Amino acid sequence: MKKVFITTLGCKVNQFESAAYFSGFAAYGITSTRDIEEANFIVINTCAVTAKASSQSKQEIRKALRSNQRAQVIVTGCHAELASKELLKEHTISAQRLQVIGNVDKNILVSQVLDLAQSSVDKTVLRQISDSPPTSLRVDHFPNRTRAFLKVQDGCDSFCSYCIVPYTRGRSRSMPLEELIKQAQTLERNGHQEIVVTGIHVGMYGKDLLPRRDIADLLETLCQATPQIRYRLSSIEPTEISWKLLTLMRDLGNFMPHFHIPLQSGDNEILKNMNRHYSREEFKETIEKCRSIVPEAAIGLDVLVGFPGESKQHFMNTQDLIQRVDCTYLHVFPYSRRPGTKAAEFSDEVAKQTKKQRVEILRSISSEKSLDFYARFLHTKRDALIEHQPDRSGMLKGFTDNYIPVRLNCTPLGNQRIITVELQQATNQYVEAINVT
């Protein structure tokens, strides 16, 4: 029996697409393996969001070709989109085993791989990113995952000055609503109890559809179509959080109270240079609006530290804004130059050591914010989705509806993964809880 090994780098959209490959290969009787050396096919779903991500993608390709010298190696994803010629040139010795498939053609990856395994036709399928509909992929289930992902759109129209994604994914295109409902129902039938709604620019969902829709319409429809599924929204821009979206989160029992919002900088000059379309004042108002309607919601922020030209005062403005807003946690990233973006042409680079120090400052603030948020809910009861396997210490782990990480003693749960827990004691990384279902 033939086997496939799949490596996924980068975003939740890539994870959804890789799950579709697992489903596609399984339909042909090809099983998945975690042993790269026994695979007949190796798929590497690459990322290019940073120069480091591209470097990691290259490392995975070299590792695959070196570890298994008989398997067909298929490279897809954003790094493949950017560097197909470079990849084929670098690996000329392995050219007969190497295949590059671009983002536009991910929907035919499995059939293309199996056809090429039997023939000697061109091994590169890389059409130019266009405004065609996003690739339609079907996922039966997510192997080894309690939580599933649902890709609702692809591409981005924002062109932030530091970001390569619009060049690798194209313009924003939305999946048809009927197709998304069917996909959610399939995931529900196959045992998933929580779905993360994701995309490259998820807040743009529906702007290109007829009739025109928006992300709030989508969440309302999904929550009503599959009321037993918990829905969680992935990253959404501050300018796209509407009153309708907030009231749905407040009123629908299966729309989880959790936001992840890119801030990137708390300084207006840096925001302008990043080509972000809001001010620090507007961002603060958005967080206050979220808190007023859904006070128990977890609110995570993305922050990009050390953008070219970021002075000490610019950083202090960011630090000040974060201290002022009632957020729950931060994802902090040091800026890295991404060739092909507008920001790559900017001068006045921030020193590496300075970026490191600023990252550490913000991560310390994040820990304080998280502990403060956890403390609000101690000795209260919340519903939590529990992972299937205990950790090394024999504890079960999971997340409450409002994204508080919990740990509890291992007790038999059967197929029911959503339980009621009482939050008892907070640590830096999680809250100790007990099952009170």
Image: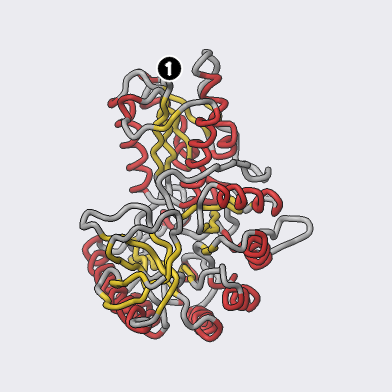
- Work out which residue is located at the far right of the displayed protein and give it: 211
Residue 277 horizontal/vertical position (percent) = 55, 70
Which of 273 and 256 lies nearest the eye of the viewer?
256
The residue sitting at 41% across, 78% down in the picture is: 381
Image coloring type: secondary structure
Residue 232 horizontal/vertical position (percent) = 52, 64
Residue 403 horizontal/vertical position (percent) = 42, 69
Residue type (three-letter) at the residue carrying disc 1: Gln
Decide: is 166 above or below 420. Answer: above
Which of 264 and 136 lies nearest the eye of the viewer?
136
Q: Quadrant of the N terminus?
A: top left
Q: Is residue 174 at least partly visible in the picture?
A: no
User: Left of 226 or right of it: where is 299?
Assistant: left
Decide: is 295 above or below 69. Answer: below
The residue sitting at 64% across, 60% down in the picture is: 222
User: Left of 198 or right of it: where is 62?
Assistant: left
The residue sitting at 46% across, 80% down in the picture is: 296
Decide: is 231 above or below 370. Answer: above
The residue under label 1 is: 96
Q: Is residue 1 at least partly visible in the picture?
A: yes
Residue 352 horizontal/vertical position (percent) = 25, 60
Q: Quadrant of residue 127?
A: top right
Q: Secondary structure at mark 1?
A: loop
Q: Quadrant of residue 348?
A: bottom left
Q: Quadrant of residue 265?
A: bottom left
Counting the numbered discs, the total is 1
Residue count near mark 1 (Cα–Cα under 10 Å), binned few <14, some 14–19, many ≥20:
some
Q: Quadrant of the C terminus?
A: bottom left
